[in-house]
Image: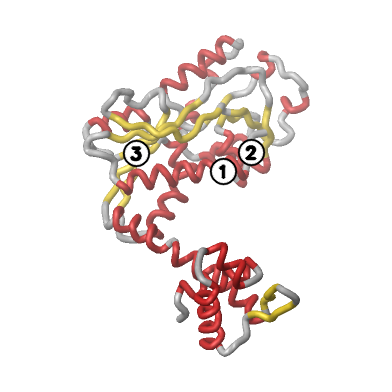
Amino acid sequence: MPEIRHLKHFIAVAEAGGIRQASRHIHLSPASILRSVRQLEEQYSVKLFETQGKKLHLTLSGEYLLKEARTLVKGLEGLAPRLEQLEEIGSGALKVGLAPAVADLLMPAVTSRLISENPSIRISTTIDTAAVLNTKLKNHELDLAIALENVLIANDRYSFTHIYEGTPIWVVRKGHPLLAVEKPKMEEVGRYPIVAQHLEQYYTERVQETLRTAGLLGSRIMPVSHCNNFRLLCDIVQQTDAILMGGLLNFKTRTCSQEMCRLHLPLDLPRVRFTAAYPKIPSPSPLAKRYVSYITEEVSAIIEKYPAG
């Protein structure tokens, strides 16, 4: 097994095109760099460079070693911080509370990522309304809660991390009668039932107020609006003329959404803001912070892959 410093010196020469150029770049004597290259050549019984003019060029063996060396050095350099992270997390436990929309979209990827990195950790998840999560957080039954910002406890005993903000969109099945209308009037929209993924009471009241102001009855939001299963809601919309109100991230990331179309309505729905909250005392565990970090990374990845529109 070659020493990592020998590989670093070899990489420097390959990237700089010469011993002296590499020496200036990594601030090491040319003799030391040359010794590293020679030791690699002797260890593997190959010639890594050949001279062409005033520059060194990689041989076929050198090109192969460069590729492998970069991978190996990168992995070894990331080893220390990764071990430090695992040492912090240890074999701890985490009690997480999630709003249904967050759980449905993000929990599988984040939980599997954490467990694959450290199989000894224990994660228990409560999926419920923000009101219930608030109570559990207050009673120290949860280490962390992620739900609607407006509903979560707002005081100086808790730390907050912004997760995501967006406006719900309207979706209908392909061939829906409203798609043939350039600018649907509210009385036309009012002929069809509205279904939605689980809505907090706080948000439901604001949505109903928006619909009433637009001339639509708030009661048109069907009881199924409290369903947590986005796939089931997609099935309902595909088989009926119902209108689905849901999050853009959910719509963009589901294969069932391929059979549906966005419906642009002149309604200014209230924005939703999801936030993570955890008590300041005791201070959040490294595992809780990592969970939130992975949640935000997952959201960023989805937004980058599925831009709004």
x then y, percent, for residue 8: 51, 70
Residue corresponding to mark 1 = 302
Q: Residue at x 70, y 73 (%)?
A: 55
- The amino acid beneath tag 1 is Ile
Residue corresponding to mark 2 = 307
Q: Quote the CA–CA distance across marks 1 and 3.
A: 22 Å
Q: Quadrant of the N terminus?
A: bottom left
Q: In front here: 114 or 259? A: 114
Q: Quote the CA–CA distance across marks 2 and 1.
A: 8 Å
x then y, percent, for residue 2: 47, 79
| C-beta proximity under 8 Å, tags 2 and 1 | no
Q: Callout 1: few (<14), some (14-19), or many (20+) C-alpha neighbours within 10 Å?
A: some
Comes first in the chain, label 1 or label 3: 3
Q: In front here: 250 or 14? A: 14
Q: Residue at x 72, y 25 (%)?
A: 178
Q: Quote the CA–CA distance across marks 3 and 2.
A: 28 Å
Q: In front here: 280 or 275? A: 280
Corner quadrant of residue 143? top left
- The amino acid beneath tag 2 is Pro
- Residue 97's disc number: 3
x then y, percent, for residue 233: 55, 37
Q: Residue at x 43, y 55 (%)?
A: 113
Q: Is residue 241 left or right of residue 97?
A: right
Corner quadrant of residue 220? top right
Does residue 161 lie above or below 55 as drawn? above
